[in-house]
Image (spheres, grey):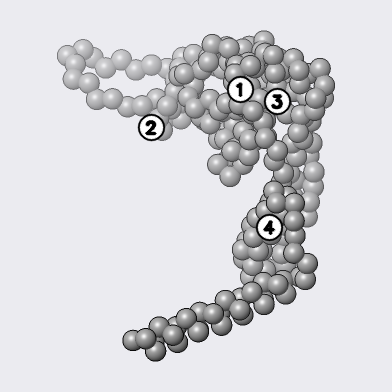
Amino acid sequence: GDALLVLFHASLEQWLPGDSDALGMESYAVDTEFTIVTMDPSVLRQWELSQYQRLADAVVAAGIRVLACQKLVDPWLCDHLQHRGVTVLSRLSLRHVDHVQRMTGAVPIASLAALPERLGDVCGLVGRAELRTVCQRTYIVLHHAGQGPAAANATAVASSRAVARPCATLIVAAPDESGLAELRRCVPQAVRCLQETAISGAALHGGGRFEAHLAEALGERARRAGGEAGGDA
């Protein structure tokens, strides 16, 4: 059935920002007269796990069943959420995260330092998620949410979320790189033509013959206009 989805633009691989060490602690140079005191990394890790625990509790309390993240998710948090019945979708990348936002209507969370007080206020709604194998590669397919009781309840809880819009995924393949390069040019043009047809409700018959005649007529008109301009000069 339908489920609430929370979407993170921020990385969930580490709670603290920075890349100076494995825990993400940023380095600062401070002049001091006191002896430098070192801290056991396990202490920071325990604090980090406590923050992940609080986040997981908030996710479960809000009734969220899917957590999607543009980047990596901490393995402990991923396992913990999955054991509590929450599906984790990590590493969506910039290529896909906007489509997930469009399809679900979720408001992305950009920073762990600015978590909303109520996660339900930024949640979106998604249908079932399934694994599908195409050409020996595994893909996650997200389905649109329906209009059942779960959808009505989610709309009431997440009243401030963005409106979900239609979204579809088209998977294409080619036998070699040259064929794939051609598809990269042709497929967006075909999609645009389909969009224009759906919007206008009209299509021209002839399999491109009209465009060929139109191009010839425009070319002839351009040549005549160029000749007349040259004669006037």
Instruction: Please give left or right for residue 31 compared with residue 221 in the image.
Output: left
* Amino acid carrying mark 1 in the image: Arg
3 or 2: mark nearer the eye: 3
Give the labeled residue for mark 3: 125
Dot 1: element: loop
C-alpha gap between disc 2 and disc 4: 49 Å
Dot 3: element: strand
**Which mark is drawn over residue 161?**
1
Q: Quadrant of residue 129?
A: top right
Task: Identify the residue at horizontal 56%, vertical 82% (top origin).
Answer: 220
C-alpha gap between disc 4 and disc 1: 31 Å
* Mark closest to the chain's N terminus, 4 or 1: 1
Task: Identify the residue at horizontal 40%, vertical 30% (top origin).
Answer: 18
User: Dot 2 surroundings within 10 Å: few (below 14), some, or many (20 or more)?
Assistant: few
* Amino acid carrying mark 3 in the image: Leu
Dot 4: element: helix
C-alpha gap between disc 4 and disc 3: 30 Å
Task: Identify the residue at horizontal 63%, vertical 35% (top origin).
Answer: 102
Tell me where residue 72 appears, x and y as whole percent.
57, 33
